Image (cartoon, rainbow, N blue to C red):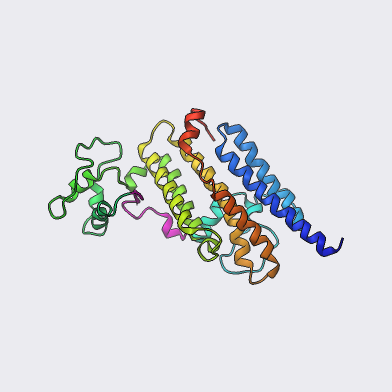
Amino acid sequence: MTEQDVDALVEELARGLRRMAAGLLEAAAEHPDAVRARELTAAARMLTNDVLARLDGEAVTDSPARRIEPDVQDAPPSGRSTVAVSGRALEELVELYLPDYERRLDDDPVMTDPGLPYERWNHLHRLEYGRGEPFEDAPLWNDTVPSRGKAVVRGMTSKQEVLRRLHHSYVTRRHLDSPEGELAVRVRQGCTAIRRSRAIDDGDFIDTSDLKVKLEDLQWRALVVAAERGHHARTQLLTQLRQLEALAVVVLELDMAFRQRNNDPSLGARIAGAAQAAKAMLRHWPPNVEEAMTESGHTAL
């Protein structure tokens, strides 16, 4: 067996192990037992930090949490995988692709229902970009609003009445003034960062329109759960964050290789393997949070 044959086998093994690590993280996100979910996550990180690091010829230290700040520009490989070093792929992507000013909730509404028909969405759009701050007077999510759902007539319905009739079609900053709201904001930021990543935006590896729909749906569910502040809101949001982290792991692996491709032509096999792992995960992502909650009752991270 030649040296090239050995290298090819090692690369094939590494691709399989990356898919296995992604599968472990996905299983952790779906698992109803919090203790078992943590064990699965730890196994995935050990696989990434130790086994894959050794296959890549990297020195394994006693401090896998030590961070190396990634560079969003095309740069030569630094010798250690950001995914392997940090174990926090979602945070890495947010740092890479979300400027500080975009992490603040300056928009009001924070988000409108992605399934809203255009005519009803357009009423909110005109309010958002009109004069004054009409959303400051919007009813809170749990308020009782008798006129909710009634038709809005342009030029006839007041701004305040538009917000009442379109209640539950938008989430505002005031809805997120809670610990649960902070978790929902993390989901929102993570979704934005994944969608903006260079590999996703420029790489043409996956169906971006399908990914956009999935990320928008996940954001909306997270924001609604936080706005409702129900009994299991924190549990559901932590589950959504775990699901998003599982996706972020494979996206960041693909993104890192994609950004370094011009400096290292040998990364082609790594890119292909990472793209395959991302496609495989997205076929069944995200799992149904509501069904998991029904089956498990409640789960704490």
Q: Which residues are magenta?
A: 98-115
Residue 228, image x, y percentages: 36, 37
Q: Residue furthest bottom?
A: 262
How many numbered tags mark residues here?
Answer: 0
Residue 177, image x, y percentages: 36, 43
Q: Is residue 5 above or below residue 234?
A: below
**Secondary structure mainly formed by the magenta segment:** loop
In the image, 73 versus 286, the foreground residue is 286
In the image, 117 versus 202, the foreground residue is 117
Q: Residue furthest left?
A: 156
Residue 41, image x, y percentages: 63, 41
Q: Residue at x 70, y 46 (%)?
A: 47
Decide if residue 229 is in sight here.
yes
Q: Quadrant of residue 230?
A: top left
Q: Residue at x 68, y 70 (%)?
A: 265
Image quadrant containing the N terminus:
bottom right
Decide if residue 78 is in sight here.
no
